[in-house]
Image (cartoon, helix red, strand yellow):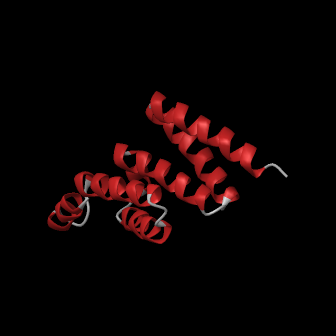
C-alpha cells in the first residue's frame, strides 16, 4: 500500500493515472473500513472534474462505483441510488456493458437494503 501512495504523490495532481491510483487506494480504504479517508480520496477525484464530459472518461465512471460503495456503507441510500441512476445513463451512453452490469447489480442491492 505504501508504494501506491508514493506513486500518487509523485504523479500530477490530476489526470487518469493519478485518479486511477487514488480510486484504488479509496477502494482499499473502504475494505479497511476507513470510510473518512476513502471519502476524502473520492472527493479529490471529484475535484479534478472540470466539465461534464469528464464524467464519461473511464476512470471517472469506475470511480463512481467506488463512490456508490462508499455511500452505501455510510447508509446514504438515496444519494447512492441517484448516483447509480446517473451511472446507468453514462454506461448506456458510453456502451460500457461491464459498468452497466455492475451498476444494475448495485441498484438491486441498494434497493433491497433500503426497503422498509
The residue at 43%/67% (across/down) is 43
Give whichever of 94, 103 is nearer the camera.
Answer: 103
Q: Residue furthest front?
A: 32
Q: Quadrant of the N terminus?
A: bottom left
Indicate whether 71 appears above or below 94. below
Report the side of 65 relative to 81 (left or right).
Answer: left
x and y percentages locating residue 16 in the rendered image = 27, 52
Residue 90 in the image: state x and y as whole percent: 50, 41
Decide if residue 59 is on the left or right side of residue 93: left
**Furthest residue to the right?**
116
In the rendered image, residue 74, in percent from the top left (x then y), is placed at 61, 63
The image shows a total of numbered marks equal to 0
In the image, taking residue 53 as reference, residue 16 lies left or right, namely left
Q: Residue at x 18, y 64 (%)?
A: 6
Query: x%, y% of residue 86?
Result: 58, 47
What residue is rendered at 47% in x and 52% in y? 66
Say left or right for 81 vs 54: right
Amino acid at each position: 500500500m505504501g508504494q501506491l501512495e508514493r506513486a500518487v504523490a509523485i504523479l500530477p495532481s490530476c489526470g487518469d493515472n493519478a485518479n486511477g491510483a487514488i480510486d484504488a487506494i479509496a477502494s482499499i480504504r473502504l475494505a479497511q473500513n476507513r470510510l473518512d479517508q476513502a471519502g476524502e480520496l473520492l472527493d479529490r477525484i471529484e475535484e479534478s472534474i472540470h466539465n461534464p464530459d469528464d464524467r464519461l472518461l473511464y476512470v471517472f465512471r469506475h470511480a463512481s462505483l467506488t463512490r456508490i460503495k462508499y455511500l452505501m456503507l455510510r447508509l446514504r441510500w438515496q444519494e447512492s441510488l441517484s448516483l447509480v441512476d446517473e451511472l446507468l445513463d453514462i454506461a448506456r451512453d458510453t456502451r460500457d456493458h461491464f459498468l452497466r452490469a455492475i451498476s444494475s447489480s448495485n441498484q438491486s442491492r441498494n434497493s433491497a437494503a433500503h426497503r422498509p
